[in-house]
Amino acid sequence: MKYHLVTLGCQMNKSDSERIAAVVEELGYVVTEHEEDADLIGIVACSVRQAAINRVYSKIHKWNQLKSEKPLLTFVTGCILPADREKFLKLFDLCFQISELPELPAMIRQYGVPTPFSTNRAMDPAEDAARLAAEGFEALEVDGHKIIAGRPVMMKQPETRIAGFWDITPHYQSRSEAYIPIQNGCDKFCTFCAVPYTRGREISRPSGDILAEVRRLVGKGYRSITLLGQNVNSYGRDKPGQEMRFSELLEEIGKFGETCGERFWLYFTSPHPRDMQDDVLEVIARYDCLAKQIHLPVQSGDNKLLIRMNRNHSVQDYMRIVNAIRRLLPTATLFTDIIVGFSGESDEQFENTANLMQEVEFDMAFVARYSPRPGAASSRWEDDVSQDVKKARLHRLSEILRQHSEAHNARLLGGVYPVLVTGRDRKDGYLSGLTEGKINLRFASDDASFIGQIVDVEITRTMAFALEGRLAVAGSQSPEDS
Ligand code: SF4
């Protein structure tokens, strides 16, 4: 029997999908790229944009038509707003929070669906009902040999449920790059964002589990590991006195990196400026395995707009952190997220953002045109900046970014830098990869054995957002070494 999984949205959802794949493959399902061939179809939804929600509705409409041709079970999970959840419950067979993933096998059984493994044994309804009751489901009706389909009622507390989810060993999509969720939910309530309403309040994963996952991945040869969370640097604050702070978690990983004998880079995304203290930067400076790359969303360069966004930090706070990064991590690249055309953004407020970009000189910025996100507080406010103005503002920031990226990359010319080789490049005879600072690079080579390895590359050509080079010969130096 086969399953098909559609993942919408951010890296967090992609990481969640790796755990979903592990659970359904444990039941004996085999993945298929073709939804028409699947017996089980799931979608990991994203509520960030209405377009993503519309995609869920169009998919389920098609899948429900497929049901007239063959038996098919459908499920939806991910970031779902309460209003959509009500509608999804009527359209999908199963609708569950990602923290309820460990119960998915029981939900499928509750639906009376034989899984590939269960078809090899006679089903005992009484035994199944007792097991499901023990797993926290409401009592089930039994009709002959089949359990009546019914919606599962989750009895467990959120903390217990998410712990079970984290215990699942994911089926990682890559053999060299992996993502480790370290927390779930968000307490910040930025007015443009719906995450606190879809994923709930912040819960930190036990540090022992995170460290074990890092050790396991490094032992298997993973070279790039990213700690994931909506607010990674507020890690542990929901469990004061019981759990490490984020800087202490990084310190433990740093110490492991010093002694494990393997080369890897550890990243994290996304931190919140409000919780960014120097102790985090000082730890990164101390350990080679903690990558010198910081992604710190600013969203706007105007204090009044930052208040309207409920970001709880000022431009001055942000600049204090940028200066600390430049002082403590002089080789680090700096990435950010910016929204243009937020509700009420005046020309002058946008100019403040452009000025901030000029001052900080980001290596990369993910600039988004504002669109109201259903469920977020700002969706009740007028979306009063025209599309043309939003486009022009995005274009202006993109040009500033391009100039800074071009200038920064030019400084790397002639140097030798370690590069994680991620795959074959589109250009024949080239491999592509990422520097420690996550700058895209390609170099001439046909040797696929380099993929997944960190190799030294001499930079021979630079441009905005990309580098080109050749494999370095022993003894070459980077400009910083000389
Ligand atoms: S910090 Fe703000 S933008 Fe990030 S997940 Fe929380 S509410 Fe959303």
Image: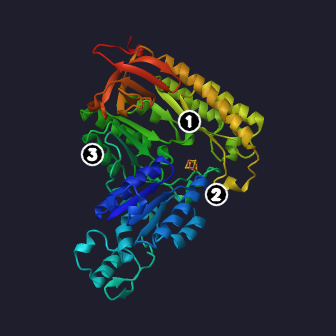
Q: Is residue 326 above or below residue 230?
A: above
Q: Percent from the top left, x then y, of residue 14?
A: 43, 50
Amino acid on which disc 2 is placed: Pro
Q: Is residue 159 visible?
A: no
Q: Percent from the top left, x then y, of residue 389?
A: 74, 38
Q: CA distance from mark 2 to mark 1?
A: 24 Å
Closest to the observer, 88 or 67: 67
Closest to the observer, 67 or 212: 67
Closest to the observer, 128 or 264: 128
Which residue bears the numbered disc 2? 374
Amino acid on which disc 1 is placed: Thr
Q: Secondary structure at mark 1?
A: strand
Determine contact: label 2, label 3, CB under 8 Å.
no
Identify the mark at residue 216; answer none if there is no mark: 3
Q: Is residue 242 above or below residue 436?
A: below
Q: Is residue 87 visible?
A: yes
Q: Is residue 108 left or right of residue 311?
A: left
On whether ligand 1 comes within 8 Å of the CB at mark 1, the answer is no
Amino acid on which disc 3 is placed: Arg
Q: Is residue 332 above or below residue 275?
A: above
Q: Secondary structure at mark 2?
A: loop
Q: Residue at position x 34%, y 83% from top?
A: 146
Q: Residues within 10 Å of mark 2 (few under 14, many from 20)?
A: many
Q: Quadrant of the C terminus?
A: top left
Q: Is residue 216 left or right of residue 49?
A: left
Q: Residue at position x 56%, y 26% from top?
A: 323
Q: Is residue 385 left or right of residue 32?
A: right
Determine contact: label 2, label 1, CB under 8 Å.
no
Quarter of the image for residue 355 reads top right
Q: Percent from the top left, x then y, of residue 41?
A: 42, 63
Q: In front of the other: label 2 or label 3?
A: 2
Q: Quadrant of the N terminus?
A: bottom left
